[in-house]
Image (tube, rainbow, N blue to C red):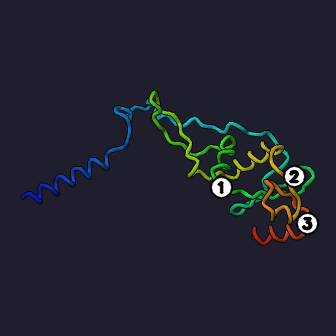
Amino acid sequence: MESKLRILIRERISTIVKEFDNYPAGAKNDPSAPYNQPSALEPANHPSGGPVELLTSVDDIILFKEKGAGGLWAFYFEPDLNTKSAMADYGTPSTEKEWDGDSYVDNYNLSDWIPDSETINNYVNGEWDNLSKGEGIHDWESGNYDLVKVTDQELKDTLDNTLN
């Protein structure tokens, strides 16, 4: 008898836990509750135009084509928190609602966020003047530059092998 009672209690607790949705009291069915409002986060920066446009990307290497001149630029995207933080104004990072003591606010979750190609394109164009630039295979291999202009056949071959 005691074991049946324990089983019933465990089943009921399990059901209650599954129903627990982490909403504040009364917010679950109230569409006007702040917790139920869609995130209003929009990228802060949408550069209109810019010197380059995203051509292609594979994994962490993105190729950009210069507008007008047609030159190629390679960008190595390292998805660490510093890079993601710099890109956050150019995209829409994943957010979670958190209580700050007075109200629910959107909280960036940069650790899980992978910037999409539009965000990376906006970032490169918006930060063009601030990004370090190099040329050729030596600068690409050094890792000291944000963008490297593809000016020699060796770099073209390296990128071609990596991207294909």
Q: Outermost residue, right direction?
A: 69
Which residue is rendered at x = 35% and y = 32% of the image?
Answer: 26
Which residue is rendered at x = 84% and y = 71% of the image?
Answer: 157
N-terminal-most mark, 3 or 2: 2
Which residue is rendered at x = 87% and y = 61% of the image?
Answer: 150
Gap in angstroms between the C-alphas marked 3 and 2? 16 Å
Q: Residues within 10 Å of mark 2 (few under 14, many from 20)?
A: some
Q: Which residue is identified by label 3? A: 152
Gap in angstroms between the C-alphas marked 2 and 1? 24 Å
* 3 and 2 marks in contact (CB < 8 Å): no
Residue 33 or residue 108, whichever sits in front: 108
Taking 111 as reference, is 156 left or right? Answer: right
* 2 and 1 marks in contact (CB < 8 Å): no
Taking 28 as reference, is 154 above or below it? below
Taking 47 as reference, is 110 left or right? Answer: left
The amino acid on which the numbered mark 3 sits, given as a three-letter code, is Asp
Query: SS class of the residue under badge 1?
Result: loop
The amino acid on which the numbered mark 2 sits, given as a three-letter code, is Glu
Instruction: Give residue 161's position: percent from left, percent from top.
Output: 78, 72
Taking 90 as reference, is 6 above or below it? below
N-terminal-most mark, 2 or 1: 2
Instruction: Give residue 135's position: percent from left, percent from top.
Output: 88, 59
The quadrant of the image that shows the C terminus is bottom right
Q: Which residue is identified by label 2? A: 66
The quadrant of the image that shows the N terminus is bottom left
Q: Which residue is identified by label 1? A: 79
Gap in angstroms between the C-alphas marked 1 and 3? 27 Å
Q: Residues within 10 Å of mark 1 (few under 14, many from 20)?
A: some
Instruction: Give residue 117's position: percent from left, percent from top.
Output: 70, 52
